[in-house]
Amino acid sequence: MDARPVILDVDTGIDDMIALLIAATAPELNLRGVTCVAGNVEIQHVARNTGKILRMVGRGDVPVSIGAARPLQRRLRTAQDTHGPTGTGYVELRGEDRQLGTTEYTTVPAPRYIGAHITRHPGEMTIVALGPLTNLATAVQHGVQLAEGAREVIWMGGTLEERGNTTETGEWNACVDPEAAEACLAHNAIDRIFPLDATQDVVFTIDDMEALPDTYLSGIVRDAVRFYVEFHRKADGIDGCYLHDPVTLIASLLRPETVTDEVEERLACDTSQSPYAAGSLYRSEIPERRIVRVAAALDPEMMRDELLGRLARAVERSSR
C-alpha cells in the first residue's frame, strides 16, 4: 500500500515536536510538507523548532512553510508557561549544527502551500492541523476548496464535555484563534476533530521517557517532556502530561482502532469578546454545516504502547 500523503500544520511546542518525530519516521505516511503557525510560541520559534526536529531524524528533505504570525483578528498569546520560552521546555534548539544538514524552507507561505497541494492533487492530501487554525482559515478565505479538495482534514482542538485547558469550556488551539476555527467550521473544512475529551484519556510520565533508547535525540525529548510534566503537575495535579498532538496523529491515521468512541456533531466556535466564552465549541443548528466526526474516547493502554514504540524508533534515527 502506498504511503498516505500528509501535510502537518503545527505550532511546534513540546507535543507537536513528538508528533513531528513520529510523522517524519512513519512508513505509512508520505510527509509532503510541514506548515508553521504561531500559537504555543511565536512563529520564528515554531519554524526553527520544526526545521531542527526534521533534520535530527534525517528528514531535512521535507519542505517547511512559514505561515501566520498572529491570529486572524486577535492579539497573539503564547504558552511559554506550558512549553518553555522557545517551545521545547528545558532544551532550546538554537544555533546551527552543520552535522544536521539543512532543511528545505520554502518561500511559499503556508496558506498558498496548502492550496497548491490541494489543487494539484485533488482528493489525495490529508491535512493534520495540530495548532490554531489560522493557516487553514486563511487558505479557505482565499478560495482554497478544502471541503472538496482534501482527502481529509483533521484537527486537534476544542472540547465538548471535558473541562477546557484555557477557559472552563475552551481548549488552547480554539481559544488562540476562535475566528479561524469558526471560519473552518462554517466552510465545512474540517472532517474530524480530536478534542480534549479524547486526547486526555492517556497520561505519559517521565518514566515512559526514561525507557526510550539512550540517544542524543531522546535526551532532547526527555528535557522537553520534563518541563511539560512539571507544568501539568502544577496545573492539573497529575504526575505526567498529555501529549495531545501525537495522540491525534496516531489515532487518526496510524492506529485508528485506538478510538473507542466517536460522535457526530454539527459544530460552531464562539467568537465573542467574552474572555470566558470565546473559543468554546458548541453544537450548531445550521443544517448546511457538515457533520464532523469527533473522537470521544481512546484506549489508553493501546495508545501508550503505540506512541512510545513509534517514538523509540524515531529517536533511534537521530542524526547525531
Image: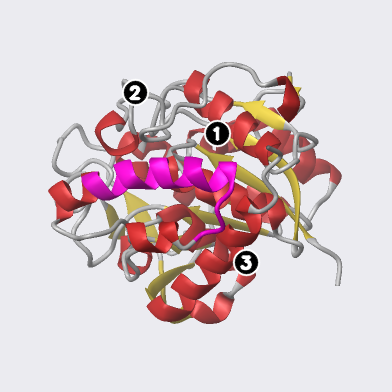
The residue sitting at 32% across, 60% down in the picture is 196
Cα separation between marks 2 and 3 = 30 Å
Residue marked by disc 1? 135
Furthest-front residue in this view: 214
The residue sitting at 57% across, 24% down in the picture is 48
Q: Residue 76 carries which label?
A: 2
Choose top left, top right, bottom left or bottom right for residue 227: top left
Instruction: Decide whether residue 229 is among the magenta residues.
Output: yes
Dot 1 falls on a residue whose secondary structure is helix
Which of discs 2 and 3 lies nearer the camera? The answer is: 3
**At which x and y percent is residue 179?**
38, 36
Answer left or right for 319 relative to 261.
right
- Mark found first going from the N terminus, 2 or 3: 2
Answer left or right for 31 relative to 85.
right
- The answer to whether residue 286 of the structure is visible from this angle is no
**At which x and y percent is residue 240?**
27, 58
Query: What amino acid is at disc 3?
Result: Leu
Q: Bin the neighbour count of mark 2 within 10 Å (Cα to Cα): few under 14, some 14-19, many 20 and up.
A: some
- Mark found first going from the N terminus, 1 or 3: 1
Q: Quadrant of the N terminus?
A: bottom right
Q: Colour scheme in the image?
A: secondary structure
**At which x and y percent is residue 93?**
51, 26
**Residue 300 or residue 239, whichever sits in front:** 239
- The answer to whether residue 184 of the structure is visible from this angle is yes
Residue marked by disc 3? 253
- Mark found first going from the N terminus, 1 or 2: 2
